[in-house]
Image (cartoon, coloured by chain):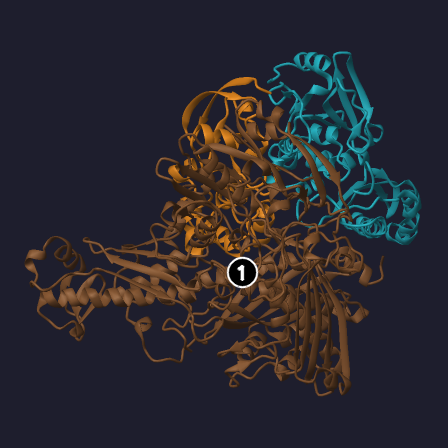
């Protein structure tokens, strides 16, 4: 069914429960349907819901509608200015035809552990708007991702928007990903933000993906970097990363390899921050 | 799911009205219902790019969208793009350089290349490869395809801007 | 430089050697090709299969009643329903002594022996309805132990997958030439390694497709097949189904990639034929991508332990290899699953002068999908092993790798040559190719650049790989062993009343340019422009009888047949023209669609007039003249079992030693395939083949668990090479035509794939050499490289 209003969506979700799936970009859902991994009775096409695709400046930050397509985010001047981390991440996501349809809200709801935007959401301290017949609530990104393809969404809820807070002065971001081929899911990825004041790192956030069931904030590694002169603390941070990450292995690499690659990305991420101006 | 949905859309410039099974994807709709067999399925999981066509001006995987979603949409397949002449220079360059062999991937690659040249008038070879990195070709090894797209970009640039 | 007497190939306005674009590519560019799935027939129904989820399981029972009741379902069948409607097949050939295999059936009988084996089939009004019904079939499985590892399969006490055959050793063969032990004993250095090669699958973008259309009223079966060998397929049908030779037609129109995958007999396709015979209506089956991964033939799973003895002056003294390869639970039909291993042991080391060679091959059954011939059959393994040992030998004696090759490659004037394994080389050009390569790639310059960058911590590698390629096989390859595989091909050319030429030929087109190559030859000999030539292929009813396209034989064999037939037609045309003009045929020629005076070039009469006179105006001809404006010739190689070609490839890459990631910077091929009819098409075949080989070196592997379950059977997980990671590929040629045919063409389709993995592996190991690290497993994944470096 093609939903024309959110109330319709809520009504169907409440009535059908697991038998209904939200169809937004479809770039993750439809492959699963085609492969008969999922067999819902009903698809709720939300692509016509009004107002859910907008990207707007708000309180110095951004409010991005759940239906905003990756390609739109990649072209948006607002995103480039106010959430450069997302702007850096977009080209790594799949391929152009996928980016023309896939949505920000869909990426968050899907919660693939190797996906780019969930990690960016956590790194940016995004606030995720979630709505249902029972009303609206907001969930902090770091509380939104619970496990493998598991989020804080209740079965009757959908993501409607994402708020990105106003970036603090002096914030720099970098986005790195190691993938076997362009557009593949990341073997290991890193979204990194920090304030750089007179060459000193303040409030760094290192969010790794592809290293666990959900994006992992490397707090020990961040702690090692915090307050230090950029490149000076890399070795210490790499060492500390061993406390933050215990990646499960997959087809591409075992846990030890992933941890090693994460350490390499950490060093390169800090280098990128040192070299960047935004 | 046996429910059927009524859709009205344009396909290659022609108005089409049909009742479609809710579960029918766009590839099957085009091939089985409308007889446009130029759009082909290579994987049905969105990875190979063979089914790439244009919906409302954007390159999209036809295997990942249901016909039922396309009420009011404007769909252009390789047949329409060929008939309109929009990609004639790309097709000629592909032909001259043998940037296709079995031809199964070709429609998807032409659609992707056309979008690249629309958005990036003078792409470097690396940018061409990057943009086409989601289109699988087993026959050519990609080199001739990159040559052909590069040549068309240069031609269009010399002719005074993108189409 | 082509050193042979002037022939038809050197005529003015000849198309031989010209890079003409393919006329038959236009329809593909506009989405107007005809692949099997595009064909619509009245009362067409669709097949879907239930496949074994287990690598090894007994089928206790299959309940199909629920499935048969589903909407749109026409029939549900299991092996029992098809019994007596076909004869089983066995994938052995008499000349592969000792090769054993169990009979195979369209649907598994009592036991499934690989994950993906078809067990039941549903025929329904749509593919979706058929798949829905498949989900309703209930199979009572008894899981049996998987025998997934080749080495384990041969270990004493391993369960025999086919108990009637005794053990899991399908085939073994040994080669012993010269004095191997003596050579190793006197060597100044011995290098050895164990090389492993992952299982591959072809991943043709158009999956396997077949539409079997049986008309019971006239007992005619028409099979529309995505295949390379229609006549062979017809023979197979005749052998295994109760049909008359006059009652079977196989048609191959546009084929979306094959690379050898589509020349084998597949149980599901045989089931489709059986179903059409049973139902008396057209049945179509198009494999989807997921089932392709578990049902297409696989290839290249080898473990080779290899040693090379070398003297301090860099002379290769001996080579010894032991090759273990795992196939499926059956040897594939009709080409067997032993040819790949056979070629590995035949080819290894063969392009070097060394006369001392020992090899052992063991081919083991496994509970994995059946394997068989796939582009470059065995060459990538033989080349990778040989060329890796050569690089190591060079390192061991302190010689530059190019120099060690130069000292050991067979001299260009040493031919004819017979290798230790008995391969007969008519004439190759290894030394000149190597010299040309070093110049083309600026080897010296790259070594300087490599050294400079190493000093800055940037690690680049250069890898060389010399190789030979088997092309144009003669009848001793398959036919001798009883296979219904023809080593000859035929071509019929006809002049039509309007002056155009229709060519029907038994070699086939899958995009490589067969039809264009044939048209170029016909047009050149007959003196017409290419636009006037129409080529028909891929139809057992419309073409002469022949082998089709495989083993890089289309140009060498099909092209020669076309050349001879064109010469014969030309003679017939000039005979008729002479009768019309009252001139001796010997003073006439054909040029640009006109009969001309051979000496002056003056136009006498149009070819179309000759055609019309022959067909419509017999009244104007002398009474004893019977115009024959059609000619047919067949050709098969007789002198040499194969027409070997040779070449050398080079890879230049950068290795990120922190991440193990490889960036391919550039690739070169210098290839000698004799006469080149269309350089553009030949170079593109080479490039496409190279990229398949690059995929092997860096990305492709079928990953299995201990239970024989495929872990990466989707396109997201089985990594095929995409544009973003592939380099530009430069190609140059030398030409040593074969003297065994007038065209002088050898084959080239598989050359790229043969040498590319070896070149890349050598380049990776060259980049790793400052670290004392080495990788001998393909694909050389980041993890494997990091482990070799000791970083993880």
A243 left or right, relative to A4: right
Q: Residue at x 70, y 45 (%)?
A: C712
Which residue is more in the foreground, A182 or B69? Answer: B69
Which residue is more in the foreground, C566 or C321? Answer: C321
Chain under numbered label 1 = C
Residue A93 occupies which quadrant of the picture? top right
Q: Judge whether A222 appears above or below C485 on screen.
A: above
Which residue is more in the foreground, A146 or C128? Answer: C128
Residue located beneath label 1 in the image:
C687
Which residue is more in the foreground, B116 or B77? Answer: B77
Residue C152 occupies which quadrant of the picture? bottom right
Q: Judge whether C7 appears above or below B26 on screen.
A: below
Q: Residue at x 90, y 49 (%)?
A: A237
Supply the letter of whichever chain is brown.
C
Q: Residue at x 38, y 50 (%)?
A: C245
Supply the letter of whichever chain is cyan.
A
**The residue tagged with tag 1: helix, strand or loop?**
helix
Q: Quadrant of the C terminus of chain A?
A: top right
Residue C165 occupies which quadrant of the picture? bottom right
* Residue B38 visible in the shown view: no
Q: Position of residue C564 (x, y in %)?
A: 31, 68
Q: Position of residue B120 (x, y in %)?
A: 54, 44
Q: Quadrant of the N terminus of chain A?
A: top right
* Residue B71 visible in the shown view: yes
A275 left or right, relative to C384: right
Q: Judge whether C643 appears above or below C75 on screen.
A: below
Q: Position of residue C368 (x, y in %)?
A: 68, 50
């Amino acid at each position: 069914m093609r939903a024309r209003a959110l109330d319709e969506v809520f009504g169907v979700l409440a009535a059908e429960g697991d038998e209904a799936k939200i169809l937004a970009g479809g770039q993750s859902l439809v492959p699963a349907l085609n492969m008969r991994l999922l067999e819902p009775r009903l698809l709720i096409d939300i692509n016509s819901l009004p107002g859910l695709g907008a990207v707007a400046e708000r309180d110095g930050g951004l409010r991005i509608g759940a239906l905003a397509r990756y390609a739109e985010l990649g072209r948006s001047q607002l995103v480039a200015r106010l959430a450069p981390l997302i702007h850096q991440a977009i080209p790594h996501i799949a391929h152009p035809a996928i980016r023309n349809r896939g949505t920000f809200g869909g990426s968050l709801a899907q919660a693939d552990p190797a996906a780019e935007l969930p990690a960016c959401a956590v790194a940016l301290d995004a606030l995720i708007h979630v709505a249902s017949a029972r009303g609206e609530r907001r969930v902090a990104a770091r509380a939104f991702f619970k496990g493998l393809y598991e989020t804080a969404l209740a079965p009757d809820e959908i993501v409607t928007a994402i708020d990105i807070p106003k970036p603090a002065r002096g914030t720099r971001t970098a986005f790195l990903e190691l993938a076997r081929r362009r557009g593949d899911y990341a073997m290991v990825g890193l979204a990194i933000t920090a304030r750089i004041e007179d060459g000193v790192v303040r409030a760094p956030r290192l969010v790794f993906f592809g290293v666990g069931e959900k994006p992992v904030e490397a707090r020990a590694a961040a702690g090692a970097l915090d307050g230090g002169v950029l490149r000076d603390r890399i070795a210490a941070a790499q060492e500390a990363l061993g406390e933050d990450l215990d990646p499960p292995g997959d087809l591409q690499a075992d846990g030890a390899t992933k941890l090693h690659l994460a350490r390499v990305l950490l060093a390169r991420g800090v280098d990128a921050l040192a070299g960047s101006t935004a | 799911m046996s429910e059927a949905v009524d859709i009205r859309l344009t396909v290659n410039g022609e108005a089409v009205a049909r009742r479609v099974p809710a579960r029918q994807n766009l590839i099957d709709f085009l091939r089985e219902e409308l007889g446009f067999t130029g759009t082909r399925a290579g994987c049905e999981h969105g990875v190979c790019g063979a089914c790439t066509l244009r919906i409302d001006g954007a390159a999209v995987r036809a295997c990942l969208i249901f016909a039922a979603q396309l009420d009011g949409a404007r769909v252009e397949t390789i047949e329409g793009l060929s008939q309109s002449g929009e990609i004639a220079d790309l097709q000629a360059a592909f032909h001259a350089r043998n940037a296709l062999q079995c031809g199964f991937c070709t429609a998807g690659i032409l659609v992707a290349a056309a979008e690249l040249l629309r958005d990036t008038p003078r792409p470097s070879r690396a940018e061409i490869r990057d943009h086409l990195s989601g289109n699988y070709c087993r026959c050519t090894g990609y080199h001739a395809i990159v040559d052909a797209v590069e040549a068309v970009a240069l031609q269009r640039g010399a002719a005074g801007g993108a189409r | 430089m082509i050193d042979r007497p002037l022939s038809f190939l050197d005529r003015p306005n000849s198309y031989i050697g010209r890079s003409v674009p393919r006329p038959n590519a236009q329809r593909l560019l506009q989405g107007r090709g005809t692949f099997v799935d595009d064909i619509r027939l009245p009362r067409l129904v669709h097949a879907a299969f239930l496949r074994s989820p287990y690598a090894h399981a007994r089928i206790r029972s299959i309940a199909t009643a629920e499935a048969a009741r589903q909407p749109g379902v026409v029939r549900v069948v299991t092996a029992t329903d098809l019994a007596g409607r076909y004869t089983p097949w066995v994938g052995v050939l008499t000349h592969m002594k000792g090769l054993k295999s169990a009979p195979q059936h369209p649907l598994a009988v009592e036991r499934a022996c690989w994950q993906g084996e078809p067990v039941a089939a549903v025929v329904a009004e749509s593919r979706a309805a058929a798949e829905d019904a498949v989900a309703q079939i209930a199979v009572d499985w008894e899981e049996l132990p998987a025998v997934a590892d080749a080495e384990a399969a041969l270990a004493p006490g391993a369960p025999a997958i086919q108990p009637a055959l005794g053990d899991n050793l399908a085939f073994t063969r040994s080669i012993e030439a010269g004095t191997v032990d003596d050579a190793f004993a006197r060597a100044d250095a011995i290098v050895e390694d164990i090389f492993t090669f992952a299982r591959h699958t072809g991943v043709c973008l158009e999956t396997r497709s077949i539409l079997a259309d049986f008309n019971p009223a006239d007992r005619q079966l028409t099979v529309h097949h995505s295949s390379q060998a229609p006549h062979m397929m017809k023979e197979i049908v005749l052998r295994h189904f109760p049909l008359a030779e006059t009652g079977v037609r196989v048609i191959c129109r546009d084929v979306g990639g094959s690379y050898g995958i589509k020349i084998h007999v597949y149980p599901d396709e045989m089931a489709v034929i059986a179903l059409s015979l049973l139902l008396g209506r057209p049945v179509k089956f198009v494999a989807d991508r997921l089932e392709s991964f578990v049902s297409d033939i696989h290839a290249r799973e080898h473990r080779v332990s290899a040693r090379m003895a070398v003297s301090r002056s860099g002379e290769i003294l001996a080579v010894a290899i032991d090759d273990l390869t795992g196939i499926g639970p059956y040897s594939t039909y009709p080409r067997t699953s032993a040819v790949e291993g056979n070629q590995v042991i035949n080819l290894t080391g063969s392009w070097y002068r060394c006369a001392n060679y020992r090899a052992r091959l063991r081919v083991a059954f496994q509970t994995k999908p059946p394997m068989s011939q796939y582009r470059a059959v065995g060459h990538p393994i033989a080349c990778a092993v040989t060329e890796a040992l050569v690089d190591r030998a060079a390192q061991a004696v302190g010689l530059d790798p190019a120099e060690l090759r130069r000292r050991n490659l067979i001299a260009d004037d040493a031919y004819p040559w017979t290798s230790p394994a008995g391969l007969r080389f008519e004439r190759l050009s290894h030394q000149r190719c190597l010299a040309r390569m070093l110049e083309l790639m600026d080897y010296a310059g790259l070594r300087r650049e490599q050294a400079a960058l190493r000093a800055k911590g940037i690690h680049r590698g250069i890898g060389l790989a010399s190789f030979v390629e088997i092309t144009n096989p003669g009848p001793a390859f398959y036919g001798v062993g009883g296979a219904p595989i023809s080593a000859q091909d035929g071509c019929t050319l006809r002049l039509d009343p309007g002056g155009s030429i229709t060519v029907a030929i038994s070699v086939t087109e899958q995009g490589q340019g067969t039809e264009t190559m044939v048209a170029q030859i016909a047009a050149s000999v007959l003196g017409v422009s290419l636009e006037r030539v129409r080529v028909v292929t891929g139809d057992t009813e419309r073409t002469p009888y022949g082998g089709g396209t495989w083993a890089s034989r289309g140009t060498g064999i099909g092209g020669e047949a076309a050349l001879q037939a064109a010469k014969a037609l030309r003679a017939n045309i000039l005979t008729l023209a002479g009768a019309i003009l009252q001139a001796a045929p010997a003073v006439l020629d054909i040029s640009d669609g006109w009969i001309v005076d051979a000496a002056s070039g003056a136009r006498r009469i149009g070819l179309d007039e000759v055609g019309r006179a022959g067909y419509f105006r017999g009244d104007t001809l002398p009474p004893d003249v019977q115009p024959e404006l059609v000619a047919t010739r067949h050709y098969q190689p007789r002198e040499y079992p194969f027409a070997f070609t040779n070449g050398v490839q080079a890879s230049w890459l950068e290795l990120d030693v922190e991440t193990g990631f490889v960036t391919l910077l550039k690739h070169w091929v210098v290839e000698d395939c004799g006469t080149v009819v269309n350089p553009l098409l030949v170079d593109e075949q080479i490039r496409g083949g190279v990229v398949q080989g690059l995929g092997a070196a860096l990305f492709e592997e079928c990953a299995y668990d201990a239970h024989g379950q495929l872990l990466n059977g989707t396109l997201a997980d089985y990594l095929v090479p995409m544009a973003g990671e592939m380099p530009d590929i430069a190609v140059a040629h030398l030409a040593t035509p074969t003297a065994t045919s007038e065209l002088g063409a050898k084959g080239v389709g598989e050359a790229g794939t043969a040498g590319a993995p070896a070149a890349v592996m050598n380049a990776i190991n060259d980049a790793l050499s400052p670290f004392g690290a080495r990788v001998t497993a393909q694909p050389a994944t980041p993890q494997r490289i990091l482990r070799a470096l000791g970083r993880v």
